[in-house]
Amino acid sequence: MVHEVDVCFGATPSRSMEVIGHDASSGRYLAQSYNDQGTIEQSEYALDGHKLRITAATARFLGAFDAAGTELTGLWELHAAQTGWQPWIELKLVRDACGRRGAVRR
């Protein structure tokens, strides 16, 4: 699966592409992302019921889908050597009637 991101943090645009795949031998969902700043990062996805966890070396996400599966809310955190994990982005994605998603709050 390919996930494309095109957002703004304030007036600063940020674009990235992520390729997500399933490793059948381990049962894990792994991803590799590439952003417009030249950063490449690997992450792992884990879905447990309605809870979604994404873990990478410098960022992590913990969120949950609503019962209907039309809304995902959660928190992205960034890791810094001096301060450890710190809140970064509160996320709310809502599927509209046409199947599109949106809405990121920082």
Image (cartoon, grey):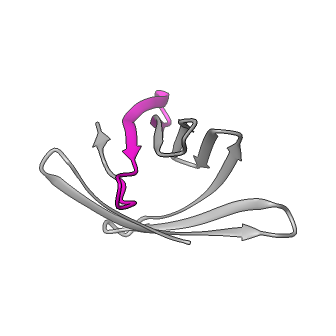
Which quadrant of the rendered structure holds the C terminus? top left
Q: Is residue 10 visible?
A: yes
Which residues are drawn in magenta?
75-101
Residue 57 spot, x, y in % from top left: 58, 49
Residue at screen point 29% across, 38% down: 105
Toward which corner of the image does residue 6 lie, by quadrant? bottom left
Residue at screen point 54% across, 41% down: 68
Residue 100 falls within the magenta-colored stretch: yes
Residue 38 spot, x, y in % from top left: 37, 69
Q: Main secondary structure of the magenta part?
A: strand
Which quadrant of the rendered structure holds the N terminus? bottom right
Toward which corner of the image does residue 90 lie, by quadrant? top left
Image vertical order of residue 96 relative to residue 51, above or below: below
Image vertical order of residue 65 relative to residue 43, above or below: above
For residue 36, side relative to residue 99 (left or right): left
Near-viewer residue (80 or 93) = 93
Residue 74 spot, x, y in % from top left: 47, 34
Residue at screen point 31% across, 68% down: 36
Q: Residue reaching furthest left?
A: 11
Q: Is residue 78 visible?
A: no
Image vertical order of residue 92 relative to residue 17, above or below: above
Residue at screen point 64% across, 53% down: 45
For residue 95, side relative to residue 2 (left or right): left
